[in-house]
Image (cartoon, rainbow, N blue to C red):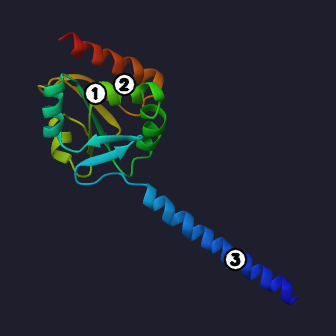
Amino acid sequence: MKTKKLLSIIVLILLIAFAYISYNTSLEQIRFSDKNYSYLGGMTWYRSMDKGFEIAQNENKPIVVYFWAIWCQYCAGFQAKTLGDPQIKKILEEDYVLVAMDLDIDRDVANKYGVSYPPYVLFLDGNDKVIDRVAGAVDAGTFLPIVTQVRDEVRRK
């Protein structure tokens, strides 16, 4: 009887230790944003529209503005499945200036562009002209042609 009790206690301690380590490790790995950047969909996004416009004008690239929120369950899926798609990720990282706006923090920017819910993606040129909009969590097959078309339109200018 003592052996069963001792074994149960050891298993319980191991489970608690494993849960503690797993919980703390995942918290360290998950970092959504800091003062200058957001880290979403495996990419680094600027948190400043001014910085986005500055780079877009210097490099003649379009800006993709991703409106998101920490509580948005659709944002998590959109980030993983659509923004995380290898083709989309490659195009965004190479051919766009990435700016992410947290709807809970950046209400003034959201209001300026008429964005009221996440996920929402706005495509702008370097002069703040809206080129296209994508409302909601669309799949990669829907998003890829838009990303390609906007990029090509800005390149032709």
User: Which quadrant of the figure contains the C terminus?
Assistant: top left
Say which quarter of the image contains residue 7: bottom right
What residue is shown with label 1? 96
Residue 91: assigned label: 2
Can the viewer see residue 117? no
Can the viewer see residue 114? yes
Which residue occupies 35% across, 46% down? 39
Residue 90: x percent and y percent? 40, 27
Residues 72 and 140: in front is 140
Residue 12: assigned label: 3
Comparing marks 2 and 3, which lies closer to the viewer? Answer: 2
Label 3 element class: helix
Which residue occupies 73% across, 79% down? 10
Question: Mark 1 belongs to which amino acid?
Answer: Tyr
Label 1 element class: loop
Question: Mark 3 belongs to which amino acid?
Answer: Leu
Q: Tell me if 5 is positioned left or right of 87 in this view.
A: right
Which residue occupies 23% across, 52% down? 105
Q: Residues within 10 Å of mark 3 (few under 14, many from 20)?
A: few
Q: CA distance from mark 1 to mark 3?
A: 50 Å
Mark positioned earlier in the residue sequence (1 or 3): 3
Whether the residues at callouts 2 and 1 have beta carbons within 8 Å, the answer is yes
Mark positioned earlier in the residue sequence (2 or 3): 3
